[in-house]
Image (tube, coloured by chain):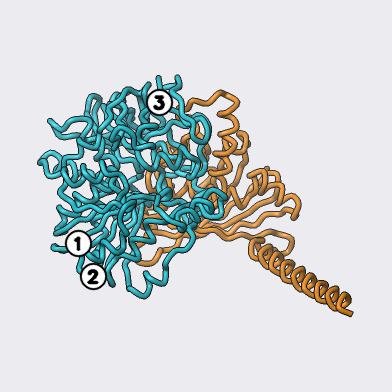
Amino acid sequence: MTNNGTRWALLGVTAATAVGVGRAVARRRHRHQPQRQDGWYVVRRAVTVDRPRDEVIGFWADRERRDRALAGWATLRQLDERRWRCVARDRAAGETQWQAEITVEEAGTLHWRVEDGPMPQLGRIELAEAPQGRGTEIRAEMRYRSGPLRRLVGLVGGDEPDLALRDALRRAKALVECGQVLDTRDDPSGRSRAQEKRTDRMRETLMTGGRA
Amino acid sequence: MRALCWEGVGKLAVRDVPEPRIRAEGDIIVRVRASSVCGSDLHLINGYLPAMREGDILGHEFMGEVVETGPGVRRHRVGDRVVVGSVVACGGCWYCRTEQYSLCDNSNPQPVFTEKLWGHAAAGILGYSHAAGGYAGSHAEYIRVPFGDIGAFAVPEGVPDDSVVFASDAMPTGWMAADFCGLTGGEVVAVWGAGGVGQMAARSAQLLGAERVIMIDRFPDRLATAAERIGVETINYAETDVLEALRELTAGRGPDACIEAVGMESHDVGPTYAYDRVKQAARLQTDRPTSVRQAIMACRKGGTVSIVGVYAGLVDKFPLGAAMNKALVLRMGQMHAQRYIPMLLDRLAAGEIEPGYLATHPLSLDEGVHGYELFEKKEDGCLRSVLHP
């Protein structure tokens, strides 16, 4: 009788624990999943730049400053009055390149479409005034087609569109605020070439994604 | 060039490494003339601050001579003698604009680790692990300083290298600790830790109006130096119950402000300390908060606890109840070097602060490993080893 009681009690505790853990994992997973709409993953990311809206727009309109700032990782070519082609080179993702067509809808609003990337992607950026004179919020919404497995592989490999969006926003903020994106990859060290390669891989992990 | 590199937990070596190059318009290259060891380096060397990699060059408290400037540098020329703040700041973000340089948004190029650990990334720091940006440090013949116009400051004539080197970190950290206390004149300030930062905090508190400063440590030679050089009262915690002694010295009130200049490897005596050692060794807590606990318990009701000792992660048995019910003000942070250095250089030139005595062991770069041994074991009266590449 006691044995049966113990068994039932253990079974009950185990079941309750399993249900609790399962629900917690599911909730956490749900919280960390991007929204899905009509087969698209939808992510929204934003960053605050400590400059007025006009200055943020002006930075990208000033060809000399922009090209100097983008040198080494992207080129922008104007196609007509509203459309631009961007070719970006991602050193962190093994020198991969992607091309996007960017269309300016109006001052402070644009959308983009990646044509030749590994997965269809489109997005939209809006600039909004930040409260308390804190500058400008760059708000991005991006949609991309992917599957859960592909997304997981991308997250582990560091080449998932959401991570790239967060990198791009952080870079844009740094370029407008201080004219450069810092990089310590070529700082001196006492490492062998093989050790440096391993360290570069760790650097890439520490440079990719995070908060926008 | 030669450089002192981290080779694994507890292991250092002097190596031949490539020379740094100008990488951006605002960079300057500095030939290092003096580079001090710092207590926070010990946390890196001993593996308590994460993200060190074999071959990383240590050192963040230094001065030297500008030997090359990027095309965008305006304030410095080749040949200038400069002292450089340890914290890297871009000068263009909201935090830099409001003089909170150690919170710079753009100077840590590898922010993801600290964003996960702390919620946001703080500024990059030279020679301070990959969590702080992966910058090469100053225990080398040359160092690249990003944003040279923001982070480097011309040294006044006549101030010796081994004195001005402390304007890079120990002095601004000490000043900020005292600044946090909101002193208006006549206060009693207690300082935990009689190392370089603690002694600079004590002197800064005096300059900001404290009537009495009481220093707490366990090394009689450090306490004697502080008493002689700065004129502070001292408590040796290895011999005296600190809380009781502070109550007695303040007629029951407790110090108006308590400065913690010890950090995550603080020592104590008794079973609580043994418990902290075991928990930290087992990685059940990352930091030992012994002196923070004491500071909170000792501080008078409504007083201020100012923390400038370095902490990285999680602590156990934090007396939040005492802090809450005594309505304490807790202030802490890495120092905003660029805010304080110009004012401190003026005070240094005027002789109001004289930190040169901290450089008890001037050594060559090749003696760097020995310099850290002396410093860590507090041997031969070592307050600071200062390396001269």
Q: In the structure shown, which secondary structural element does the residue marked by tag 2 occupy?
A: loop
Q: Nearer the viewer, residue A187 or A107?
A: A187
Asked if residue B104 shows in the view, the reply is: no
Contact, mark 2 vs mark 1 (Cβ under 8 Å): yes
Callout 2: chain: B
Residue B156, image x and y in percent? 15, 34
Residue A19, image x and y in percent? 76, 71
Q: Which mark is in front, 2 or 1?
A: 2
At 25% from the left and 41% from the top, the residue drawn is: B221
Amino acid at pointer 1: Val
Q: Is residue A9 above or below residue B155?
A: below
Amino acid at pointer 2: Arg
Callout 1: chain: B
Callout 3: chain: B
Q: In the structure shown, which secondary structural element does the residue marked by tag 3 occupy?
A: loop
Contact, mark 1 vs mark 3 (Cβ under 8 Å): no
Q: Residue furthest left?
A: B350
In the figure, the orange chain has which letter? A
- Specify which label sits upstream in the sequence, 2 or 3: 3
Disc 1/disc 3 C-alpha distance (Å): 49 Å
- Specify which label sits upstream in the sequence, 1 or 3: 3
Q: Which residue is mark 3?
A: B21
Residue B351, image x and y in percent? 11, 41
Amino acid at pointer 3: Arg
Give the numbered dot on residue B253: 2
Q: Which residue is mark 1?
A: B188
